[in-house]
Image (tube, grey):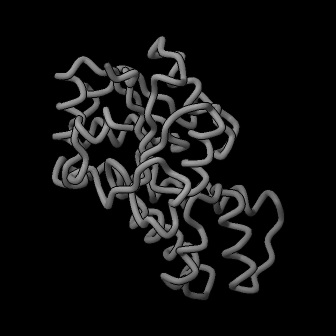
């Protein structure tokens, strides 16, 4: 009998892909400051906090701002980002995500979201899958960034499950490490070359099945 009783999902890159909106918002900010932000540079911002992202962008653009000005710029970027995610639709759910979430729930498994994003609830509502999660743990409930396991441990706690009975789905190295640090199994969503510390690597949830889950 499988010991797996719950699945905890990261949001961005696993359920939806909002990275494009972050990029558009940062690019708009860079353009207003008089320079451009390339896709290569943007890759370096993935999984990095808003404050640190802004520091890097200003550095690349050779622009100096006071702490107060930086706060104002970060807030403006977030406003643009929120405007964009408020226009998201159910078509933006990544392939296989909705089907696998439904399969988990039909099998009696608990489901939680574990994301650093403070906008998780908005995104889940907009894409129409909020009802498929028993718990949502996001940046409003946790303060320690991955690879600290806080977000996943809190998810297990809200689901009333021991960490050993939980599997985490993550697309980032820091997220896989966070799952491991919390004593959970990890399924990497992405490239095996990058996520080799995960117990299983898939290219997307369309490749996932309950059989694969129970074999972990």
The residue positioned farthest toward the front in the image shown: 1
Residue 80: x %, y % from top left? 45, 59
Which quadrant is the C terminus positioned in?
top left
- Count the numbered circles shown: 0
Q: Residue at x 54, y 75 (%)?
A: 42
Residue 164 screen position, x and y as percent: 52, 24
- For residue 14, side relative to residue 27 (left or right): left
Q: Residue at x 42, y 39 (%)?
A: 120
Image quadrant where residue 113 sits = top left
Q: Quadrant of the N terminus?
A: top left
State the image coordinates of residue 53 (x, y, percent, origin top left): 65, 65
Q: Is residue 172 left or right of residue 150?
A: left
> Toward the viewer: 51 or 135?
135
Q: Nearer the viewer, residue 155 or 120?
A: 155
Q: Is residue 47 above or below residue 23?
A: above
Which residue appears at 61% of the width and 42% of the height? 178
Residue 183's place in the image compared with 99, above or below, is: above
Specify the quadrant of the image occupied by residue 98.
top left
Name, please, the residue furthest toward the right. 66
């Amino acid at each position: 009998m499988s010991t797996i009783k719950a699945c905890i999902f990261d949001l961005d890159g696993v359920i939806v892909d909002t990275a494009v909106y972050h990029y558009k918002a940062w690019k708009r900010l860079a353009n207003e400051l008089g320079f451009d932000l390339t896709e290569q540079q943007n890759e370096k911002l993935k999984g990095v906090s808003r404050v640190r992202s802004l520091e890097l962008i200003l550095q690349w653009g050779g622009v100096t701002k006071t702490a107060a000005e930086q706060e104002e710029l970060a807030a403006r970027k977030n406003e643009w980002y929120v405007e964009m995610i408020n226009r998201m639709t159910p078509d933006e759910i990544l392939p296989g995500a909705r089907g696998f979430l439904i399969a988990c729930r039909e099998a009696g498994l608990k489901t939680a979201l574990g994301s650093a994003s403070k906008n998780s609830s908005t995104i889940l509502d907009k894409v129409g899958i909020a009802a498929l999660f028993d718990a949502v743990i996001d940046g409003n409930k946790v303060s320690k960034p991955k690879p600290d396991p806080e977000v996943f441990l809190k998810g297990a706690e809200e689901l009333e499950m021991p960490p050993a009975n939980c599997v985490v789905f993550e697309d980032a190295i820091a997220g896989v490490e966070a799952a491991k640090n919390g004593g959970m199994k990890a399924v990497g969503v992405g490239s095996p070359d990058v996520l080799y510390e995960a117990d299983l690597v898939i290219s997307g949830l369309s490749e996932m099945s309950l059989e694969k889950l129970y074999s972990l």
